[in-house]
Image (cartoon, rainbow, N blue to C red):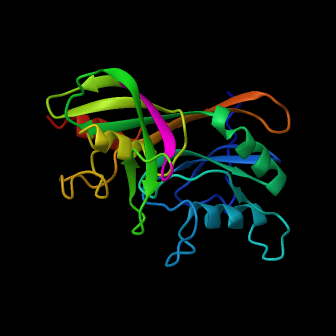
Amino acid sequence: MPKKKRFTNRHLPRGLEILYEDKDILVVDKPAGLLTVRTGTDKTRTAHYILADYVCKGYAKSQNRIFTVHRLDQWTSGVLVFAKSEEVKLLLQAQWKGTEKKYIAVVHGQLAQKEGIIASYLAEDKTFVVYSTTDTTKGKLAQTAYKVLKETRQFSLLEITLLTGRKNQIRVHLADKGHPIVGDRKYGKIEDGYERLALHSKSISFKHPATGQQMTFKSRLPSYFNGVMDNK
């Protein structure tokens, strides 16, 4: 793994930890609650906005730019990759299918099968809710590999590997299996008493678009996850 750099200037993004930076890419640890990109109602409280300001060093006329390679849901924390040029963004996205992406999740209940792959075709309705369908003309194939790491009477801690990268894929697949993610108001229990979505982007591994070097970036698991698992 590349040596972690330290940043101490005043332009260090608030709420974001920079895991790695070079002239081509910027990898951060996104906290839960922060949007990746702007929405119709919130344009400034996003990782993209904060990092765009960071690379410009506060200079409005700077030619430096930041480009979104992929997204994390607002309440999903962890590793998030940005590019510093459109060319690098496209190179990263071209190899994204082969990029290894691992997540950690806490779900309700105990899974009968402790390891496996969940597969379905995912589609999205007019209210932006993603759902599984058997109609291959409406949905796109999604595959999610999982492994149980720890269990309690109420919850299971899972390591998840994304085999495809569809919107809300992990959340929908686990809900389909009858084990929704803790704190998931959209696809899980409307109110389960937990303050945030228990889903974390643990690591991403890919070849650097300029050097070809295999790079792996990891994020520490927030203490919130251990707190949920310890709440027996």
Residue 182 vertical position relative to residue 35 in the rendered view, above or below: above
Main SS of residues in magenta? strand
Q: Position of residue 81 (x, y in %)?
A: 65, 47
Check if residue 81 falls in the magenta segment: no
Q: Count all numbered tags in the image, as a single digit.
A: 0
Q: Which residue is painted at 18% across and 52% down in the image?
A: 192
- Which residue is rendered at x = 75% and y = 46% of the image? 25
Which residues lie in the magenta part? 137-147
Question: Is residue 21 visible to the viewer in this orientation of the structure?
Answer: no
Q: Quadrant of the C terminus?
A: top left
Where, by quadrant of the figure, is residue 56 drawn?
bottom right
Does residue 124 sit above or below 215 in this rendering? below
Return the residue nearer the eye: 175 or 102: 175
Q: Tell me residue 62's x, y (percent).
A: 84, 70
Of residue 122 and residue 155, the one placed in the foreground of this image is 122
Left or right of 231 in this view: 22: right
Which of the pair 7/18 is nearer the observer? Answer: 18
User: Farthest residue toward the top?
Assistant: 114
Q: Position of residue 157 (x, y in %)?
A: 31, 31
Across and down, in percent, residue 101 comes to 56, 35
20 relative position to 175: left or right: right
Give above or below for 221 relative to 18. above
Residue for point 34% across, 50% down? 197
Rendered-image quadrant of the N terminus:
top right
Does the magenta segment cover residue 140? yes
Q: Is residue 213 visible?
A: yes
Task: Please name the residue shown 37% across and 46% down the image.
Answer: 171
